[in-house]
Amino acid sequence: MTREAAIVGAGIMGLTAAHALSLRGVRVTVYERDVETGRGCSWWAGGMLALWCEMESAEPLIGTLGLESLAYWRRYFPGVVNKGSLVVAPPRDTPDLKRFAARTSHFEWIDRNKIAELEPDLAGRFETALFFAEEAHLNPRDALAFLRKTLETEFEVRFELSTTIQPEALKVDAVLDCRGLEARDALPDLRGVKGEMVILKTKDITLSRPVRLLHPRIPVYLVPRADNHVMVGATMIESGDRTRFSARSMMELLNAAYAIHPGFGEAEIVETGTDVRPAFPDNLPRVRRDGNILRLNGLYRHGYLGAPALARRAAEMIVDGKAFPEVER
Ligand SMILES: Cc1cc2nc3c(=O)[nH]c(=O)nc-3n(C[C@H](O)[C@H](O)[C@H](O)COP(=O)(O)OP(=O)(O)OC[C@H]3O[C@@H](n4cnc5c(N)ncnc54)[C@H](O)[C@@H]3O)c2cc1C
């Protein structure tokens, strides 16, 4: 019987796994190399829980995991904003909007009046849009902090700072390797997909929900945050380099924000960031068994949409001996 588990990595994968195991009565210790929790890739995410939009390019498994994860966030995290999301395109790109609509579901076509009703500051800017009313969003940094506090106060999960720990060195019933891209030593088919993002601040434009602009190269979106902040993300570049933010990426992100509303031209740039999404060749997440180690990885651009559902499966594999072929690859 599994009484004690260790988790290496306190990103969204490690924290949701710690939660899933704690809910099943397992005593958990989390090892993280950073002083601050979740300062890896999870820190930079947009926090869109946009599973129906994602189906435009993602496999059906993301829809299954996403539906479960959306329910998880709504149940456990009070910071979920349930206002749906909008997809817009400049008039010349209306065919792209139609193509997007043909590949997705759970939306309604809305006209300029409805756009103005939902987002008054976008009044007159777009003739038509897709409104995905059932989608939601959250602030990833708040979600990471909330999970850590919940784990420490409600479940007495221990957090250990360690820069050298390796999953293979831990002697407990079960070990969960949630090191993100750092797990490439054990998962050679893991690769990095770099993402860059900008946070703008302006009092002139208020958005209530994420707005996605169809763009020929990158799926650009704006996600509102508290205190007049808006996250503009995110590039998708095949690269493991988490440091360099290119001028081209900055121009594309800011151009997209400007196309949604020229008022963003006057906004203050309060933060820029880059990190690398861990991804397998098919961009689908996995749980890989390796003795008493389970390696949970490959969340790609679906960290918040995938982690809770992957974590629940991993907990049931450990506690109940269940198998989940859809993610055990
Ligand atoms: C710009 C951008 C925007 C994104 N937007 C979204 C979005 O809107 N919605 C969404 O769902 N996803 C989004 N994502 C994807 C999401 O951020 C990732 O899928 C997710 O963060 C991966 O989580 P993880 O826990 O596997 O990895 P990480 O967050 O990288 O966590 C791994 C942790 O392990 C620690 N670690 C590594 N090695 C060791 C070791 N040896 N010992 C101890 N600790 C170790 C690291 O310090 C880190 O804290 C975005 C990503 C980027 C970059």
Image (cartoon, rainbow, N blue to C red):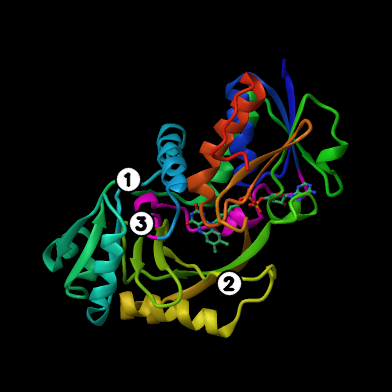
Residue kind at label 2, given as amino acid type: Ile
Which span of residues is magenta-colored? 32-56
- Whether 81 is among the magenta residues is no
Position of the C terminus by quadrant: top right
Real-space CA distance between mark 2 and mark 3, rounded to the nearest whole angstrom: 20 Å
Badge 1 element: loop
- Label 2 and label 1: CA atoms lie apart by 30 Å
Vertical relation: 260 (above or below) 107: below
Task: Tell me which amino acid carries mark 1.
Answer: Asn
Question: Which of label 2 and label 1 is nearer to you?
Answer: 2
SS assignment at label 2: strand
Q: Is mark 3 on a helix, strand or loop?
A: helix
Q: In which quarter of the image is residue 166?
A: top right
Left-right relation of 83 to 251? left
Rate crowding at label 2 as few (under 14), some (14 to 19) or many (20 or more) other CA atoms within 10 Å.
Answer: some
Residue neighbourhood size for the residue with mark 1, other residues' Cα within 10 Å, grouped as few (<14), some (14–19), many (≥20): some
Q: Earlier in the sequence, mark 2 or mark 1?
A: 1
- Who's the residue at 69% across and 67% down the image? 240
Query: Which of the two residues, 119 or 227, is positioned nearer the viewer here?
Result: 119
Q: Report the disc number at residue 237.
A: 2
